[in-house]
């Protein structure tokens, strides 16, 4: 497995694979890899001849008061995980490689990005779309793999690929959880023991929500209310949002119809965590 830091080197490698008739899968990440990322890499390895994993903490998708500086990084461990998962290449650029001086072009979206995480993170999806569009041009993959953990991101990328005719298949992968239900996330490392316990309220509240939908609840407001009540009972938790939206448009719904996305963002202490389920 190779680790390369420049756009040129990725291009050279990927184009030679394509010339040999090999298919290429791309897994974009911000590193500090865990089992959630590994599930994407495993799927990509199963479905493609060669797999590129990008490891890049993208400054453009972080707001000024967010955790860009403190975001965890461990390239050695990431490389070992990728090697073991049989990825072929890691693209690990420095910010200057992705955004050289004078950089001034962006990919923006008028729909899907205003609600949910876009409300409290207004520049986030512009950063995500721009970096992912660049990664698509650099790695020229046949398929790209994204987790349902970041459900809005998955919907936004699908929409971008369709709008801009990228000709890349977007594969959504299920959420990988800890044994006790907490969705795996690089940001879980921020939690102290009390917060780690409190963080279970995310998956627990969604489980209750899912039970009430499966039990026939049709009102989105009642469903959201039930989830809120569960979260509000946890003293260390502060709700950013609890939303019930159409899974394709991400517009809020009043009555629950399939498919809906039930998504939450909750501060546990200072750490903002997200989780969701899709009712299909
Ligand atoms: P990140 O490094 O957090 O930007 O995540 C990179 C990719 O891994 C994104 O497509 C995420 O949705 C996905 N991912 C992160 N955590 C999980 C998880 N627990 N289960 C499934 N996919 C995940």
Image (cartoon, rainbow, N blue to C red):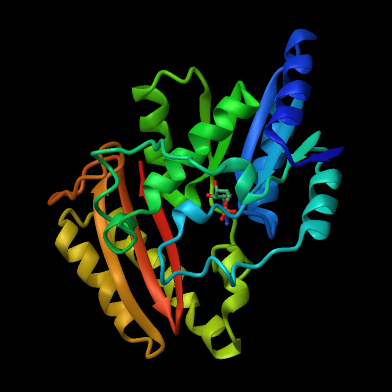
Of residues 213 and 231, the one drawn nearer to the viewer in this rendering: 231
Residue drawn at (25%, 55%) of the image? 244
Q: Nearer the viewer, residue 277 or 41?
A: 41
Taking the view exactly as shown, the residue that stands out farthest to the front is: 102
Give above or below for 252 relative to 223: above
Q: Is residue 227 left or right of residue 169?
A: left
Percent coordinates x, y for residue 58 in the rendering? 55, 52
Numbered marks: total: 0
Residue 233 to residue 210: above or below:
below
Residue 139 is situated, as x and y percent measured from the top left of the image, at 64, 28
Quadrant location of the N terminus in the rendered image? top right
Image vertical order of residue 213 relative to residue 105, above or below: below
Res 187 seen here: yes
Left or right of 167 in this view: 208: left
In this rendering, the answer to whether 208 lies above or below 17 is below
The quadrant of the image that shows the C terminus is top left
Q: Nearer the viewer, residue 211 or 187?
A: 187
Residue 108 percent across, percent down from the top left = 33, 38
Which residue is drawn at the image coordinates 62% and 47% (left, top)?
96
Q: Is residue 158 left or right of residue 85?
A: left
User: Which image quadrant is residue 100 in?
Assistant: top right
Which residue is at 48% across, 47% downward?
A: 148
x 44%, y 85%: residue? 269
- Residue 135 position, x and y percent, is 58, 34
Furthest toward the left, the residue is 254
Q: 158 or 215, which lies in front? A: 158
């Amino acid at each position: 497995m190779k680790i390369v830091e420049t756009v040129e080197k990725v291009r050279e490698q990927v184009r030679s694979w394509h010339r040999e008739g090999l298919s290429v899968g791309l897994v974009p990440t911000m590193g500090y890899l865990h089992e959630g990322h590994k599930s994407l890499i495993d799927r990509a390895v199963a479905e493609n001849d060669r797999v590129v994993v990008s490891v890049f903490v993208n400054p453009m998708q972080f707001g000024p008061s967010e955790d860009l500086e403190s975001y965890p990084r461990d390239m050695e461990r990431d490389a070992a995980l990728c090697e073991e998962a049989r990825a072929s290449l890691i693209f690990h650029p420095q910010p200057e490689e992705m955004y050289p001086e004078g950089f001034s072009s962006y990919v923006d979206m008028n729909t899907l990005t205003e609600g949910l995480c876009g409300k409290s993170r207004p520049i986030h999806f512009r950063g995500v779309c721009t970096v992912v569009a660049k990664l698509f041009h650099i790695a020229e993959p046949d398929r790209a793999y994204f987790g349902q953990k970041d459900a809005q991101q998955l919907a936004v990328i699908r929409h971008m690929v369709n709008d801009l005719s990228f000709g890349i298949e977007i594969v959504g992968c299920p959420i990988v959880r800890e044994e006790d239900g907490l969705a795996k996330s690089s940001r879980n490392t921020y939690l102290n023991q009390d917060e780690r316990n409190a963080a279970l309220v995310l998956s627990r509240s969604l489980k209750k929500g899912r039970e009430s939908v499966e039990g026939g609840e049709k009102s989105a407001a009642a469903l959201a209310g039930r989830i809120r009540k569960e979260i509000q009972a946890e003293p260390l938790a502060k709700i950013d949002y609890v939303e019930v939206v159409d899974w394709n448009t991400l517009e809020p719904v009043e009555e629950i119809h399939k498919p809906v996305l039930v998504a939450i963002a909750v501060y546990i202490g200072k750490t903002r965590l997200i989780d969701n389920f899709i009712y299909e």
